[in-house]
């Protein structure tokens, strides 16, 4: 049967097992929307109409981040596409598998400065894993196949497919390729056995090892293997902001998060280790601080699927290119072999004792001040009341760092946030995507008053589809993270960071028909949270917190890890 | 140091701007660039010259190879190779002594005259960069009116390929020196 391109797109989505699409219509994608209303139900596809294209991208990203499945977004040409760019860049930085369909003016008008024309493949070239412009309807199905394959394999990332309107109008037979073979795209999965062996030997020899896990380990699903590896070799283990949950934070070997807002003991451990075993992490500047001072006495093992990440920031002694899960399994096999042959890891008790001592000296700490609500306390209570099992999606700022430090993630994909790009406005729409993907889990968006004001339009979306996101607004009346830097590094000059002129968040939610609660005193925090968590459907909780609380420790930008400021 | 890098790509829509965009986004320099089809339909070869320390070159190679439609990346400079570029020059050559002088250089350099007019010649020369530079240097005082250069193209010497094939398996971390998607 012949069908028009728009229908072919939907059939292809069905073949890819896509169940959820986040989108926003416009002229160039009207054929697609027309097919959606006719066939979405029979194809088992639910479309969520967001209220801004950025939220379609963030929603799809939250969906991907909380499940590992490929998120799908659909937006129109021109402004639809340009509104999506931040979301695409975010997915690129955080290696999230997304396929983004953008409308485009008809092929004969491309290059004519037509109405709502934008060169979307050009604009997004530097922030996609790959992008396509479909110029022949015969190419449509194979291109979609390739797009999903590229997005979800190797180092995942966003792939954009630009669809000129005539491509969705022209008709042809639908047939979907079953297999795919690309000579120019072949991610390396297995680690070179010799390289793996050398890395394992180093892990036995090290007296002061640290296992350093990044988001790549979550992408690969390496968490179980990593736990065995840490336990077998008795490795103190830290996670990056993106890696939180890849190793249980409640595990005795867990050091929590490292880097700019990492624990004192964690950064001291990293700084003084003799072997840093990096799995799916990229030695980002927010992790290393001043590079020349970073872990100076250490040798580095670096496991990454992306060869361009290895040796990019630090010279690496034991590089292994491959999929983190597969390489960790290779490592475990060799470790077992060695152990069976009677090898024993170098003695490490002194090292563990030293780290424990650092932790005892400077644990995470905040001062309680009577009835003033401390944001850290809110996160602590959130953890307690959700038994540490919620999917938590943070926005960007101080509240994000407190959540990362204090929520205590035990499972991968529980933690959703914009790490690489650090895009304010992410937390709430991403939580929406996560809640669509994981209807049986409690999903909490922890957002700042600033970031929420970049995304609260989605209150309409969560209301419309009854998406049960618990929106926790940490309201300090400031662009708090900016204010903190201004306090600490600009002599208290709070230049344009005061946002106390803001809507009444409770009334705002209620205006959208979303129930809302507020706490203004510390003694109200627990009850308010409990009530909100018991409320079915979406709900907003505003916490009016201490206005000038700071995130500690902090490694000043460009400083060495050991020069962190503790209070 | 200067490096000549050869990139085999699927000749798809926007490929040149993808490669150029990668270089500009990451702050690498393209000194010369040449793109042309290969024997295989749909596959093109780009040859570019760039410069940087070992670390930068390594990153260039890896970032380029990472691109989805790139099939192979080779740092030609790392192995014995042959490099050629072509230059065309319009040189003033008035009848008499001047033209004589130009013709002597043409002979020495084994260049070719491809167009003649009253008072100027168009010359064509193929050679490696040093030869081309030397030729240009000698013609400059006489008067170069116009110049176009292709930038180098390069080919690995056959012996070097054989040697690589022989020792390839013994490389300690061959995956890091690998330049092809296998
Ligand atoms: C789109 C965007 N613009 C600007 C910034 C810079 N920025 C980082 S944190 C921050 C303040 C966030 O304020 P708020 O949402 O209230 O969170 P808080 O830090 O107060 O917890 C700003 C402006 C950013 N990360 N993203
Ligand atoms: Mg704030």
Image: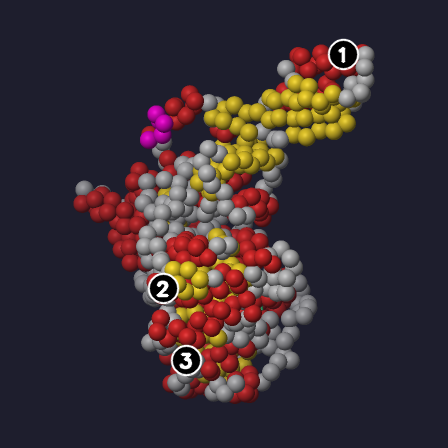
Query: According to the image, label 1 marks what residue?
Result: B100
Determine the secondary structure under disc 3: loop
In the rendered image, which quarter contains the N terminus of chain A? bottom left
Marks 2 and 1 on same chain: no
B50 lies left or right of B161? right
**What residue is drawn where x is 71% and y is 11%?**
B104
Query: According to the image, label 3 marks what residue?
Result: A468
Please identify, in this view, whether the residue under mark 3 or under mark 2 is nearer the observer: 2
Task: Compute the Cα span from label 3 to label 2.
Answer: 41 Å
Determine the secondary structure under disc 2: loop
The x and y percentages for residue A243 are 41, 59
Front residue (pair A427, A331): A427
Query: According to the image, label 2 marks what residue?
Result: A1
Determine the secondary structure under disc 1: helix
A280 lies left or right of B103? left
From which residue to which does the magenta span run?
B165-169
**What residue is drawn where x is 80% and y is 11%?**
B97
Task: Mark 3 or mark 2: name the one nearer the start of the chain.
Answer: 2
Do the residues under discs 3 and 2 have CB atoms within 8 angstroms?
no
Please indicate, yes or no, whether residue A134 appears anywhere in the rendered image: yes
Front residue (pair A319, B176): B176
Q: Which mark is residue B110?
A: none
Task: Compute the Cα span from label 2 to label 1.
Answer: 76 Å
Q: Is mark 3 within 8 Å of ligand 1?
A: no
Question: What color scheme is it?
Answer: secondary structure
Magenta highlight: main SS: helix
Please identify, in this view, whether the residue under mark 2 or under mark 1 is nearer the observer: 2
């Amino acid at each position: 049967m012949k069908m028009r391109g728009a229908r072919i797109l939907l059939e292809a989505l069905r073949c890819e097992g896509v169940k959820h699409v986040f989108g926003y219509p416009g002229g160039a994608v009207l054929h697609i929307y027309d097919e959606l209303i006719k066939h979405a139900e029979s194809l088992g596809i639910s479309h969520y109409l967001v209220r801004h294209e950025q939220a379609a991208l963030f929603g799809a990203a939250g969906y991907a981040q909380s499940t590992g499945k490929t998120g799908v977004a659909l937006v129109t040409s021109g402004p639809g596409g340009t509104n999506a760019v931040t979301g695409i860049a975010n997915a690129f930085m955080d290696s999230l598998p997304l396929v983004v369909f953008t409308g485009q003016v008809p092929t004969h008008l491309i290059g004519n400065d037509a109405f709502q024309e934008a060169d979307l493949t050009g604009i997004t070239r530097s922030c996609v894993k790959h992008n396509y412009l479909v110029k022949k309807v015969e190419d449509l199905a194979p291109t979609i196949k390739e797009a999903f394959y590229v997005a979800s394999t190797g180092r995942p990332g966003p792939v954009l497919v630009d669809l000129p309107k005539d491509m969705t109008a022209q008709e042809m037979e639908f047939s979907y390729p079953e297999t795919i073979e690309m000579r120019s795209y072949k991610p390396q999965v297995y680690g070179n056995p010799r390289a793996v062996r050398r890395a394992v030997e180093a892990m036995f020899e090290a007296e002061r090892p640290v296992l350093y896990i990044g988001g790549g380990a979550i992408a690969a699903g390496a968490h179980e293997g990593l736990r065995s590896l840490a336990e077998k070799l008795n490795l103190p283990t830290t996670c990056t902001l993106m890696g939180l949950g890849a190793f249980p934070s409640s595990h005795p070997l867990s050091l929590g998060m490292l880097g700019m807002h990492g624990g004192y003991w964690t950064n001291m451990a990293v700084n003084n280790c003799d072997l840093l075993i990096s799995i799916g992490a990229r030695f980002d500047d927010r992790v290393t601080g001043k590079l020349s001072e970073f872990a100076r006495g250490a040798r580095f093992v670096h496991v990454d699927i992306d060869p361009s990440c290895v040796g990019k920031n630090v010279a690496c002694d034991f590089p292994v290119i491959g999929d983190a899960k597969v390489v960790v399994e290779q490592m475990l096999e060799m470790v077992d072999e060695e152990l069976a042959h009677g090898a024993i890891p170098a003695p490490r008790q002194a090292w563990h004792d030293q780290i424990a001592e650092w932790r005892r000296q400077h644990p995470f700490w905040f001062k309680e001040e009577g009835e003033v609500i401390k944001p850290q306390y809110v996160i602590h209570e959130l953890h307690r009341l959700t038994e540490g099992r919620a999917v938590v999606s943070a926005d960007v700022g101080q509240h994000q760092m407190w959540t990362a430090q204090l929520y205590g993630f035990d499972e991968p994909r529980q933690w959703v946030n914009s790490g690489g790009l650090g895009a304010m406005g992410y937390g709430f729409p991403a939580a929406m995507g996560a809640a669509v993907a994981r209807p049986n889990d409690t999903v909490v968006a922890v957002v700042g008053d600033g970031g929420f004001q970049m995304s609260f339009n989605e209150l309409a979306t969560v209301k419309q589809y009854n998406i049960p996101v618990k929106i926790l607004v940490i309201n300090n009346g400031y662009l708090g993270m900016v204010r903190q830097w201004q306090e600490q590094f600009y002599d208290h000059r709070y230049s344009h960071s005061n946002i106390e002129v803001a809507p009444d968040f409770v009334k705002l939610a209620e205006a959208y028909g979303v129930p809302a609660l507020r706490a203004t005193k510390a003694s109200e925090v627990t009850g308010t949270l409990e009530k909100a968590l018991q409320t079915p459907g979406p709900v907003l909780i505003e916490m009016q917190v201490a206005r000038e609380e700071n995130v500690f420790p902090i490694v000043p930008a460009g400083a060495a890890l050991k020069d962190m400021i503790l209070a | 140091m200067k490096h000549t890098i050869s990139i085999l790509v699927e000749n798809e829509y926007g490929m040149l701007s993808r490669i150029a965009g990668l270089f500009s986004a990451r702050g690498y320099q393209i000194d010369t660039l040449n793109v042309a089809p290969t024997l295989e339909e749909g596959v093109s070869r780009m040859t570019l010259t760039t410069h940087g320390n070992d670390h930068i070159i390594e990153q260039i190679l890896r970032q380029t190879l990472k691109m989805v439609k790139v099939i192979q990346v080779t740092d030609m400079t790392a192995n014995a190779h042959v490099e050629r570029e072509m230059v065309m020059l319009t040189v003033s050559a008035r009848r008499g002594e001047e033209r004589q002088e130009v013709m002597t250089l043409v002979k020495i350099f084994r260049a070719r005259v491809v167009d003649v007019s009253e008072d100027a010649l168009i010359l064509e020369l193929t050679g490696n960069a040093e030869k081309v530079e030397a030729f240009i240097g000698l013609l400059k005082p006489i008067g170069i009116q116009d110049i176009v250069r292709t930038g180098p193209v390069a080919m690995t010497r056959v012996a070097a390929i054989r040697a690589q094939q022989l020792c390839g398996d013994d490389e300690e971390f061959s995956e890091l020196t690998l330049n092809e998607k296998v």
